[in-house]
Amino acid sequence: MSFKKTIIVLVHALAGWGICGAIIGIGRNVTTMENTLILHAIGAPVFFAIIALVYFNYFNYTTPLQTAVVFILVVIFMDLFLVALFIEKSFAMFTSLLGTWIPFGLIFTATYITGSLSKPRR
């Protein structure tokens, strides 16, 4: 895969991660952390499904499984190295099923299913 195609896949993954970050950031300021985590667990797969739909309809450089793996690895990488290490200065977020592990699973699943059901434009 070319550098340009790799960047396109990564940009889509980063867009999804950014939206998830916005859900958490805004939610913390307007409601309780529990409500925020519930909204994040619902919103993360929805937004990743929309992003995956755009990606598969217009680009489709990778298989659904490859895309789901790339998307979730980008999310884990950013959460681990940016959020946990630099922003939170704690790995406590990784002890929360609702805050981390359930959204990770749902993001992977939503991306994979969306890719599997998409009909790319040609």
Image: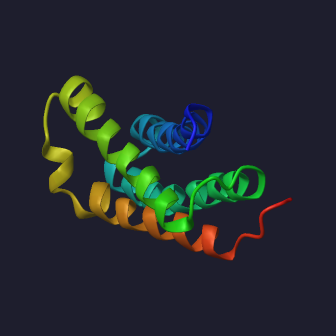
Tell me where residue 57 sits by quadrant.
bottom right
Using residue 88 as the reference point, say whether residue 43 is left or right of it: right
- State the residue at coordinates (14%, 45%): 92
Q: Is residue 117 left or right of residue 14?
A: right
Could you tell me which quadrant the N terminus lies in? top right
Q: Looking at the image, is 114 positioned above or below residue 90?
A: below
Task: Note whether residue 105 is visible.
Answer: yes
Left or right, 63 with respect to 21, comes to: right
> Which residue is painted at 24% across and 63% down in the image?
97
Residue lying at the far top in this picture: please name it.
Answer: 86
Which part of the image, by quadrant, shows the C terminus? bottom right
Residue at coordinates 26% horizontally, 25% vertically from top-left? Answer: 87
Question: Between residues 68 and 82, which one lies in front from this camera angle?
Answer: 68
Question: Which residue is painted at 44% across and 51% down in the image?
Answer: 70
Say left or right for 77 vs 8.
left
84 lies above or below 109:
above
| As drawn, 89 above or below 13 | above
| Residue 9 position by quadrant | top right
Residue 72 locus on image (x, y percent): 40, 54
Q: Position of residue 42 (x, y in %)?
A: 50, 63
